[in-house]
Amino acid sequence: MARSRRADAVVFGFDFQVNSAIVLFLENIKEVETLCLEGNCEDIELELSSGEMVLAQAKAVEKASSDFANVRKNIQKSLISLAEGEEKVNARELIMITNSPNPFNDDKSISAFYGHAHRKYDTLPPSAKKIVDDYLSKMDKKLDTDKFKIQVLPFETDDEAERYKVIMESINAFAGSLNTNISGIEQKLLETWHWQVFDNGGKKDVSIKLSKKDIIWPILVKITEIEQCEDSFLEQFDSGVYEEVINRYADIINSHCEQCEFFIKILSDYSGFESPKRGNEKLNQFIELKWTDYIADFDFDGIDEEIREAIIKIIIFNVIKRRFTIDRIKKEVNMC
């Protein structure tokens, strides 16, 4: 039983780390370039476009609302680790992110950490600041307190809706800023990002990092899925061909494209396409003349030529039809 509880604690801790990484990524979306779990320095590492880093120690407590026995040890360990990380890289922020609503086990400061709190060192209550100062005074390596922050991310219980509530609030706010009007995109992002970040964190090669494009890609997939295609365009395909396209479309677009670069390539080609036609007539002409240019971007082994042609044409149609939404997303996240 003890071994099982330890294993459960490890899984819970890593789940918290994954979700903390998602929240920190979204909070830094304009500047973040890459995200790495279990990096050279810290649990969570964000590389920014300025070359600076956001380093975060993730400290989870299974019974966060009632168990405060080790929270001060978590602060001490985080300060030591963050100070070591600060020596290695140019850090903009040094964060201890925890799910404990009472991270200092201190009645005088507990009210400062209500909800999804962000407290920089200079905004800490005096009693909490003294605890930090006492730990810092005993450390060999120094930590720049101007960069230090404690962030509380509520995360507890086995009820998924409750455990991921604040994470979903962050995703909902982000998705709302993109104005995609795609139903269900928030839950899809949570599921996809969980898998992406978890998979990244499970690999011990610290050179493996998720780029902004990797993480934004699921949004572009969602807004260009086959269900978004207009019936008037789909009517050109035989019903049997269309059924096969439906079966293969999602796997093809997820697995065989060069992801964001492929969409950008299509939009660039269309922007430079000269034609006396306008609107849908121009779009249809572009598709008919150019669809073969994109065959090499896919692995179509074992797929009938007629199916291959239909898949490429539908993808091109959806990408170009959603070009203003794609441009808006790129601008919102500051992605080239």
Image (cartoon, rainbow, N blue to C red):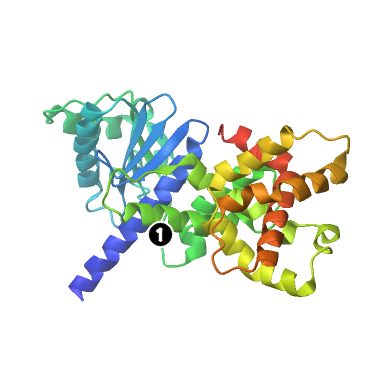
Q: Which residue is mark 1?
A: 156
Above or below, comparing residue 64 to residue 38 in the picture = below
- For image coordinates 60% across by 62% down, the residue present is 250
Above or below, comparing residue 45 to residue 10 in the picture = above
- For image coordinates 50% across by 46% down, the residue present is 215
The reply to whether residue 223 is in sight is yes
Kind of residue at disc 1: Glu
**Residue 140 or 308: which is nearer the viewer?**
308
**Residue 125 or 196: which is nearer the viewer?**
196
The quadrant in which residue 120 appears is: top left
Q: Is residue 258 left or right of residue 94?
A: right
Q: Report x, y in % for residue 198.
A: 38, 56
Quarter of the image where the C terminus is located: top right
Q: Report x, y in % for residue 58.
A: 32, 46
- For image coordinates 44% across by 35% down, the residue present is 33
Q: Report x, y in % for residue 322.
A: 73, 45
**Few, some or many C-alpha atoms within 10 Å of disc 1 (few <14, some 14-19, many ≥20)?**
many
Q: Is residue 80 left or right of residue 275?
A: left
Determine whether the residue tagged by mark 1 lies in a helix, strand or loop.
Answer: loop
The quadrant in which residue 11 appears is: bottom left
Quarter of the image where the N terminus is located: bottom left
- For image coordinates 87% across by 45% down, the residue present is 281
Count of numbered labels shown in the rendering: 1
The reply to whether residue 62 is in sight is no
